[in-house]
Amino acid sequence: MKVSVSGLPEFYAAHPEMTVNVQAPATGLPHLSPGIGIAIRYGTGGWREGRTLQLFDERVCPVAAPALLERLQAEGVGLDRAPLFHVRSPHNQHWAGWEDYLRARGIPRARLSGQIFNNYVQAAQAALDGRGVMPGWRSIASRAVRDGALRMWQDGELDLGTSYFVTGARRLSGPGRVFPDWITAVDRAPA
């Protein structure tokens, strides 16, 4: 994805008269309610409120600090034995974890042990520190991969059938239509 909260300065440059209030609910599934006219959602779609447009498909690939990844590969350690970081919270159950990834890849693992974090930022920092391998969601980890801070597990990218969507109230007008139109246009622009 080419836009994130860190991409909002580009929106503000194009629309200095507007403000986007960013809220990240604990559930990760924002709902349209009074005061919230637009929601960016992750999942398989099918929301019935408002008008929903698919932005992009999400993919996951194990990522780690380059030095750790090189060491694991040199030692012949695969994902069946690599030190894994888990992100688990009662509020993020709609995100796939290592169990889903390894099952989809057909990779058996005797024990699904590893360090557990309750948010992705903590896990990402530990991965950047070179302590383990974490699921790298393309929309979140792509900048660190592009900058060389993290490296993708070779041939590890997987599509789990999830996407990002933007949902707006059925009758958005004026300023309420500008942001969904902008984010859709930015997402569809060539990289």
Image: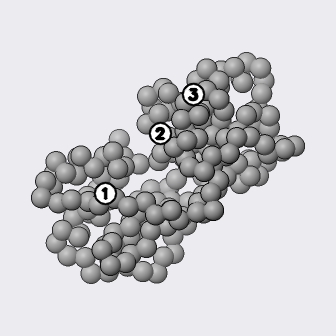
Q: Quadrant of residue 49?
A: bottom left
Q: Judge the density around disc 1: few (<14), some (14-19), many (≥20) Cα neighbours within 10 Å.
A: many
Q: Which residue is mark 3?
A: 129
- Where disc 1 sits, the SS reads helix
Compared across the picture, whether 118 is left or right of 51 comes to: right
Q: Which mark is drawn over residue 24?
A: none
* Gap between marks 3 and 2 measured at Cα: 17 Å
- Where disc 3 sits, the SS reads loop
Compared across the picture, whether 188 is left or right of 140 comes to: left
Residue in the picture at 65% in, 24% down: 68
Q: Which mark is drawn over residue 183?
A: 1
Which of the two labelled residues, at mark 1 and mark 2, occupies the earlier sequence position?
2
Note whether residue 60 is visible.
yes
Compared across the picture, whether 3 is left or right of 154 comes to: left
Q: Which mark is drawn over residue 142?
A: 2
* Gap between marks 1 and 2 measured at Cα: 18 Å
**What colour scheme has been applied to the protein in the rendered image?**
one colour
Q: Is the Cβ of the residue at disc 1 closer than 8 Å to that at disc 3?
A: no
